[in-house]
Amino acid sequence: MLVFGIFTLVANTIRRFYHLRARGMSLIWSFLSFCYLSYLHGACVVFILLISSMNFFLVKIFARTKYFVYMLWIFNIAVLLLNRVYEGYSFTLFGANLAFLDSYRGTFRWHICFNLVILRMLSFGLDYHWFSFQDSRFDQKKHMQGCYTCRSGKACYFALQERSVPIDKYSFNIYLSYLIYAPLYIAGPITSFNAFATQLDIPQKNHSVGQIAWYGVRWAISLFLMEILTHFFYYNSYASSDIWKNLSPLEIFIIGYGVINFMWLKFSLIWRFFRFWSLIGGVETPENMPRCVNNCYDLESFWKSWHASFNKWLVRYMYIPLGGSQRKLLNVWVIFTFVALWHDLEWKLICWAWLTCIFLIPEIVIKSAAKTFQVRSALGGFIFRELSAISGAVTITCLMVANLVGYVIGPNGINWLISRLLQKDGLHVLFGIFTSFYIGTKLMFHIRDAKQKCWGLGSAIVDWEKQMHKYLDFF
């Protein structure tokens, strides 16, 4: 907090005093961030600068070629895997004379943070590639019709992301400041190059000083809640030991549910802390946890609300280029496999990714069929809503099982869990859990309907205000 407080104070003061734009601010933030990285990684900063420079020259030289996208992805995935295999590389690999530098590797493993840098390198390369070919799929007018923020005279994150920036913004200084921007370097949230470069030029205006301050207060309250949770609820102790094998199916599900809630709160604290300082620095990023983990009744909405900035990145740079909804059933396998490898080279994460895909495919098929279904009566609407609630309960149950495998019992515990659930006491537990998920899904439907009504009212007020301004201008 002290370091980021000094950084943002220095950067904002210099910006206001000298009226700096993107070019000047990129130099300021590159210097501050380089000081930050020197403390975190010590001599290993050399690896970061070397790989980043290689990626930059790859983009600049080959961006206009036919096979650039393949080259970019192969290079970055190779770097991702090699970083993990060689554990950030030892200086002795490059000569015995450099062995002394291994004593100055800093306080934080650089190759762990570099996973996020790889996403930024890909973002820069693909944004520049699409700019070079003028391949923009963004429809400004259509977006304005459905975006409350843009209709109110501001620019939402999606608009900043989709708009191409001028060619001079694709410079090495802005590129480097984007990769190592201190408030977002360790954990994100992830932002696209277009959005970052635009806000480095003109700071965000969507959040006032009061709103940012309240955001910080909410973070402090969440931290207090985490302190209570870690002192009085021992879900992670059960999950990280073999004690769960001696527990009943109900207790295992409770532990799994507690672990998910703990993880949601933990990541929410981490991401909101860094997003808070990024907002103070003038760069808005997506909220990584826009919705409570207990308010998701399907896998699609869950992944849109869990590490949401990563989800937006995957949609923009993987899902749409791979064919979007036309190849959805195939895309999920490619994307979730990449997500698992990006997190770590562990077999249980691969199992988690493929289990999620197996559970996601029926949901995709059912949703596709539901879109073609026409409700023509009140009874039909009631039946459709009940079936949706049942499918929601099934989805939540599958999500619980996938997360139990990924974070509690592991792949080896799947057979044990199934055998315990199919016993007499296990079937009662499974039915009770399913019923509670069904009731919870119905409640989520009511929350969703209420929010849609509020959004419709907000849009109507904006339209009314614009119409009134036209009348006033006329008179």
Image (tube, grey):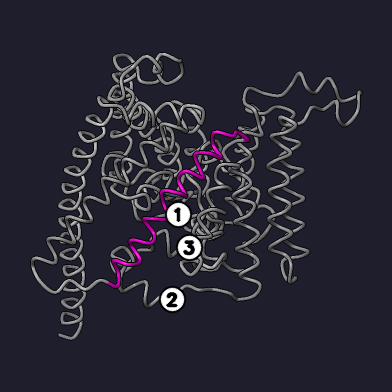
- The stretch of residues the image draws in magenta is 345-372
**Three-letter amino acid code at disc 1?**
Pro
Which class describes the residues within 10 Å of circle 3: few (<14), some (14-19), or many (20+)? some
Q: Secondary structure at mark 2?
A: loop
The residue identified by callout 1 is: 203
Left or right: where 406 falls relative to 469: right
Which residue in the rendered view is the most extreme toward the left? 378
Q: Residue at x 10, y 71 (%)?
A: 377
Main SS category, magenta section: helix
What is the CA distance from the residue labelled 3 to the residue labelled 1? 36 Å
Earlier sequence position, callout 1 versus callout 2 = 2
**Three-letter amino acid code at disc 3?**
Lys
Q: Nearer the viewer, mark 3 or mark 2?
A: 3
The residue identified by callout 2 is: 139
The answer to which quarter of the image holds residue 248 is top left
Q: Secondary structure at mark 1?
A: loop
Q: Residue 142 at x, y = what percent?
A: 36, 76
Left or right: where 107 falls relative to 235: right
The residue identified by callout 3 is: 328
Left or right: where 295 falls relative to 408: left
The answer to which quarter of the image holds residue 378 is bottom left
Earlier sequence position, callout 3 versus callout 2 = 2
The answer to which quarter of the image holds residue 322 is bottom right
Q: Residue 360 at x, y = what percent?
A: 41, 52
Q: Is residue 363 covered in magenta?
A: yes
Q: Is residue 281 covered in magenta?
A: no
Of residues 106 and 209, the one drawn nearer to the viewer in this rendering: 106
